[in-house]
Structure formats: C-alpha cells, structure tokens
Image: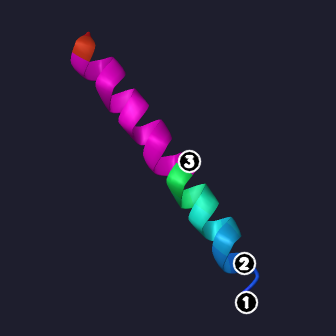
Amino acid sequence: MLLNIPYVSNILFLFVKYLMITFVSIYIR
C-alpha cells in the first residue's frame, strides 16, 4: 500500500495538470 502512494500522487498531479490546461483552453476561447 505504501508503495502505491507516489504512484497515486503522480496520477493525481497529472490529472490536475490536465484539468487546468483544459480549463485555460476553454477560458481563452
């Protein structure tokens, strides 16, 4: 379980990053 924490953290970070990029893209339009 402890070994999965960095992996989950990485996925969460990528998800937030993708969400922000999508939001900015929509906002600029």
**Label 2 packing within 10 angstroms: few (<14), some (14-19), many (20+):** few
Name the secondary structure under disc 3.
helix
Q: Are marks 3 and 1 in contact (CB under 8 Å)?
A: no
The kind of residue on which mark 2 rests is Asn
Return the residue at label 2: 4
Whether label 2 touches label 1, CB < 8 Å: yes
Residue 15 picture location, percent across and down: 51, 49
Structural distance between the alpha carbons of marks 2 and 3: 15 Å
Q: Residue furthest top?
A: 29
Where 21 falls versus 7 (above or below)?
A: above
Question: Residue 14: where, in percent of width, then height?
Answer: 56, 48
In the image, farthest residue toward the right: 3
Against 24, residue 3 (above or below) is: below
Q: Residue at x 25, y 13 (%)?
A: 28
Residue 3 x, y percent position in the rendering = 76, 82
- Give the quadrant of residue 1: bottom right
The question of residue 23 being in magenta is answered with yes
Check disc 1 and report the residue beneath it.
1
For label 1, the SS is: loop
Residue at horizontal 30 percent and vertical 20 percent from the top: 26
Q: CA distance from mark 3 to mark 1?
A: 20 Å
Q: Which residue is mark 3?
A: 14
Hey, what amino acid is under mark 1? Met
Q: Is residue 2 above or below residue 21?
A: below
In terms of image quadrants, where is residue 20?
top left
Q: Nearer the viewer, residue 7 or 29?
A: 7
10 Å crowding of disc 3: few (<14), some (14-19), many (20+):
few
Sequence-wise first label, 2 or 3: 2
Describe the element under mark 2 as helix, strand or loop: helix
* Magenta region: 14-27
